[in-house]
Amino acid sequence: MRLRHFLLLMCIPLLSTQAQVDFNRFFYDKTMRVDYHHIGTKGEERITLDKVFQEGPWPGSTVNLIDTLNLGMFLVRVFDVQSGMLLYSRGYSTVFNEWQTTAEAGSGVWKTFHESVRFPFPRRTVQVTISRRDDHLIFREKFSTVIDPNDPTQVIAETQFPPFEVIDLMDNGDIHKNVDIVIIGDGYAAEDMEKFKKDAKHFNDVMFDTEPFKERAKDFNVRAVCAVSPQSGIDVPDRNVWKNTAIGSMYNTFGSPRYVLTESNRELRDIAAAAPYDFICILINDSRYGGGGIYQLYTTTYVNETHEGQEWQRDYVYVHEFGHSFGGLGDEYYSSSTGYDEFYPEGVEPWEPNVTRLLHAPHVKWEAYLTPGIDMPTDWGKAEYDKIRAELGTMDRLADDYYEKRAPLFTRMREISQNKELLGKVGAFEGAGYVSEGMYRPSLDCRMFSLSLTDFCPVCRAAIERQIDFYAN
């Protein structure tokens, strides 16, 4: 039975043969945004409708409307009520589903998160459903509502986004035929705006100096919204630092000092609506190492590196986190503490394309990329690596002498992860997804594994390129 589900997971993108939807017949070239509340605790959830908005031009493809990538924990579907036809679908993940794996949720606490789904503005009444994967990765419906786009009591005519300046960083033409990224700053006060513009340009340059984005740069448009915060910097709860910012980003998400997210979804979406966007990148005007990325939601990246010679780390974070939100990639490292409790449960194959439980060895989801003859699983010197990792784990990352003490240990870990006999090969390397044993990644090293400016491995690169191809057509 499990093998059947595994094969189904791998075949879904190939079996999505529904005829393409006639965009102009069913949609206007505008965007509908459906806001809702996601309420629950571990193992339980409710979804309730909040508000429905009309936004500006639809930024996505007008051809690829049905999701064929099969990524994300949730799936939104839009059906034409009159014909029953599926008009649009998209996989995505949320802060809520991550929070459900924390000790707080496990203790029975209930919380509410504000979320949004966006799709082309329908010409006539539609049914919108939201489904979630079960333990076999099958989507099960959790919410359904009917929306009449011509009913002014249901749909708010225009999003009232703040009048912030929007600048073009890359303009390659038609928003329907390119990936559209919007960069938003948080913790940038009015006097920080020139800094924000420089930061936005810097990180955009970093992204498009990294493959495969460099090679596919002409398939992207990038804009920056100069969101003004009342104060500089963001919340750092474990230091009792609290700031008033445009979109409420904060460190210490789920108790992890370096995990930066925002729960101010409505404010974020209102600001982002100033520009056409498929993906959101948030620059954090603060100096603690940190960031975050959730598939089809947003990324966050700190921008102020105060340790001389370590500026490359913020560049790493920006691209790494975009790997999550854009490519649907999972973390391949397993050496850092997180606030999660069983993020990847035993016996359940992850949906992310670059991590696996290897439940069906020697078969693996990235079988098409395997190096011929490679051992499955693949021995890579993990025992020594883990010994060094344990020593690093005892060190205070926020201490002034952290980088000095880390250097020799970090160097040896890099030597192991750069073993020339294994580098570039694709197999099943144990240690991934915050789990030391029983979880595997495709390659010895990758931008999703080590804290370095190494390239994406072949499996991760292929996932990113599939996403680009889906949007740029």
Image (tube, rainbow, N blue to C red):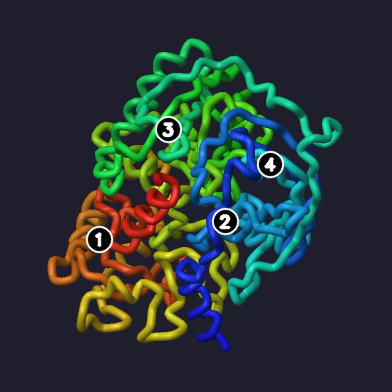
Q: Nearer the viewer, residue 426 or 308?
A: 426
Amino acid at circle 2: Gly
Q: Residues within 10 Å of mark 4 (few under 14, many from 20)?
A: many
- In this view, the residue in front, 383 or 88, is 88
- SS state under label 2: strand
Residue depth check, mark 2 versus mark 4: number of the one nearer the observer: 4
Left-right relation of 253 to 129: left
Asked whether 317 or 289 is in front, the reply is: 317
Task: Please name the amino acid that badge 4 sits on.
Answer: Pro
Point out the tag, 2 or 4, that comes first from the N-terminus: 2
Give the spatial CA distance, label 3 vs label 2. 23 Å
Residues under labels 1 and 3: Cα distance?
45 Å
Q: Residues within 10 Å of mark 3 (few under 14, many from 20)?
A: some
In this rendered view, identify the residue nearer to me: 409 or 81: 81
Q: CA distance from mark 1 to mark 4?
A: 53 Å
Amino acid at dot 3: Asp
For image coordinates 48% across by 39% down, the residue present is 300
What distance separates the C-alpha of mark 3 from that of mark 4? 21 Å
Sort mark 2 into few (<14), some (14-19) or many (20+) by Cα contacts within 10 Å. Answer: many
Which residue in the structure is indicated by mark 1? 413
Q: Which label's residue is closer to the chain start, 1 or 2?
A: 2
Residue contact between numbered discs 3 and 4, judged by CB atoms under 8 Å: no
**Rendering quarter of residue 58:** top right
Between discs 3 and 4, the one toward the N terminus: 4
The label nearer to you, 3 versus 2, is 3
Mark in front: 1 vs 2: 2
Query: What residue is rendered at 56% in x and 65% in y?
Result: 343
Cβ atoms at labels 2 and 4 below 8 Å apart: no
Q: Quadrant for residue 370, please give it.
A: bottom left
